[in-house]
Image: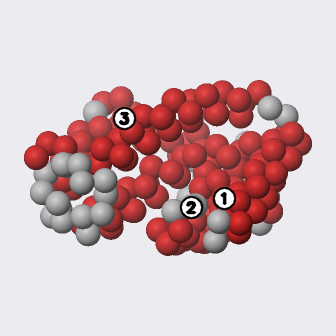
Amino acid sequence: MPSLPMGLNRGTIDWIRSVVKWIQTVLSSPTMTERLVQAPAAAAEPDTAAGDARVLDPQLVAIGVVGGLLSGLLGVGGGIVMVPLLVLWAGYGQRDAHALSLGAIVPISIGGIVTFGIAGEVRWLDAAALAAGAIVGARLGAGLLARIGERSLKIVFGCFLVAVAVAMGLHA
């Protein structure tokens, strides 16, 4: 099994300290502080008064719980679970649901990394290779998301879900 980066010990939470320190550094930077202060106003819906942003909407929390639960259990969450729920249950447009789901990936991933990392189950070099490819792919995909029509996006997404279901069923 590949060794952990930065001399971290497998099965311990030592690696969490460096992640927490990094998060604290990012959040304490003047640029990030300014963004966090402005975020509620930017998140306000167009038809609401300034400052009346949807904060911790119970419906979104419920979708997050389902997505997080299935992410931890099955390794899926954002695209396969949250996007359909955001579109069909919460009434978001397809493009907005994809964007919102992408924004939820980091916190969901951190929860899974902490749980599996404590158990010593994260293969760091393999995860780094996946992350490198995913960063490039996500950038390209987000660029396509901005250009594809809403109806086409729904069709492509639905076909993807059906193809995944069939492939998983055949390999079961």
First in residue order: circle 1 vs circle 3: 3
Mark 1 lies on residue: 80
Distance between the Cα atoms at labels 3 and 2? 29 Å
Q: How many marks?
A: 3
Say which amino acid is labelled 2: Val
x then y, percent, for residue 57: 61, 64
Distance between the Cα atoms at labels 1 and 3?
Answer: 30 Å
Identify residue for label 2: 76
The numbered mark, 3 or 2, whose residue comes first in the sequence reads 3
Which of the two marks, 3 or 2, is nearer to us in this view?
A: 2
Q: How crowded is the residue under tag 2: few (<14 C-alpha within 10 Å), some, or many (20+)?
A: some
Task: Please tell me which residue is depicted at 12% across the width and 57% down the height of the picture.
Answer: 9
Left or right of 87, for residue 101 = left
Q: Nearer the viewer, residue 2 or 31?
A: 2
State the SS at label 2.
loop
Residue 109, horizontal then vertical, whole percent: 43, 55
Residue 100 vs 169, above or below: the answer is above
Residue at 77% in and 66% down: 89
What residue appears at the point 47 percent right and 68 percent down from the top-left corner? 72
Residue type (three-letter) at the residue carrying disc 1: Ile
Q: Kindly tell me whether residue 24 is visible in this rendering.
A: no
In this view, which residue lies farthest toward the front? 171
Q: What residue is disc 3 on?
A: 32
Q: How far apart are the two marked residues, 1 and 2, measured between alpha carbons?
A: 6 Å
Residues at circles 1 and 2 in contact by the CB criterion of under 8 Å: yes
